[in-house]
Amino acid sequence: YEKIDNMPIRLHFREASVVGVIGSPDQVYEAVKLMTMDLAVHHAPSELQLGFLLEKQKTGQHAWVRWIPHCNHGNGMRNIASDNESYRHYIDYLYQIMVHRYEYSRNNVRPIPHYVVFVLDEFDLFQHPIGRFFSQSASLGFSFVFCGHTAESLPQCDHLVRLKNGEGIVVDASNGNRTQVYTPSYLPDEAAHKAARKLAGVIIDEVGAEQQ
């Protein structure tokens, strides 16, 4: 039992303020797609919100995410930004939540929902005031997933996912750079779109969910 094949790996988003994903554009897209669907099918929208900062030319590739209820923060607004206007609206919205949680947070109380934001286009994120919260965002109920070609292009990460030559390596910087090696799975776009459309029709009636 020293080695068990085909075991799933885990990324502790609740404990990670910043996660990095590096590899070719296609590899990064596949990893983000798998993370998104895995998170969405295992958590209710009241527990988890998903957000995306996308390159404008890649919005068609990510069109399926708009059906996921975790990408909707009410009033018909989606947690998806692909141009300067939608980016400004969404990032200011997140910043207000982070400031509120920072000012009114209670010790050892985890705020919900937890926000996982996939950053595939940085816009001017590092110049925005929200950047001052990156190192402590997990304690405020946020995880930012930065995607790029090299580790040098990303901020300091708690976990780093390296994708190369059909193999994935997860480096846990918070635990002495402990590594997990795995073989990435593949989810066809058609299957992701179908699953997202099915999730769109799921309504969960929950009582007592404390938000923000």
Image (cartoon, rainbow, N blue to C red):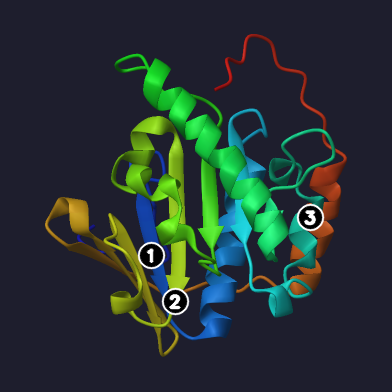
Location of residue 94 in the rendering, given as x and y in whole percent from the top left corner: 56, 40
Residue 201 in the figure: left or right of residue 168: right
Residue at the spot x=31%, y=58% of the render? 159
Residue at the spot x=45%, y=30% of the render? 99
Q: Report helix, strand or loop for mark 3.
A: helix
Q: Quadrant of the N terminus?
A: bottom left
Task: Give whichever of 110, 39 is nearer the camera.
Answer: 110
Q: Residues within 10 Å of mark 2 (few under 14, many from 20)?
A: some
Mark 2, residue position: 148
Q: Quadrant of the C terminus?
A: top right
CA separation in Å, label 1 and label 3: 23 Å
Image vertical order of residue 63 relative to residue 111, above or below: below
Image vertical order of residue 36 relative to residue 116, above or below: below
Mark earlier in primary sequence (3, 2)? 3
Residue at the spot x=75%, y=72% of the render? 189
Location of residue 142 in the rendering, given as x and y in whole percent from the top left corner: 45, 40
**Disc 2 vs disc 1: Cβ atoms closer than 8 Å?**
yes
Image vertical order of residue 179 relative to residue 72, above or below: below
Mark 1, residue position: 20
Q: Residues within 10 Å of mark 3 (few under 14, many from 20)?
A: some
Residue 62 in the figure: left or right of residue 171: right
Mark 3, residue position: 66
Task: Give whichever of 204, 140 is nearer the camera.
Answer: 140
Q: Amino acid at mark 3?
A: Arg
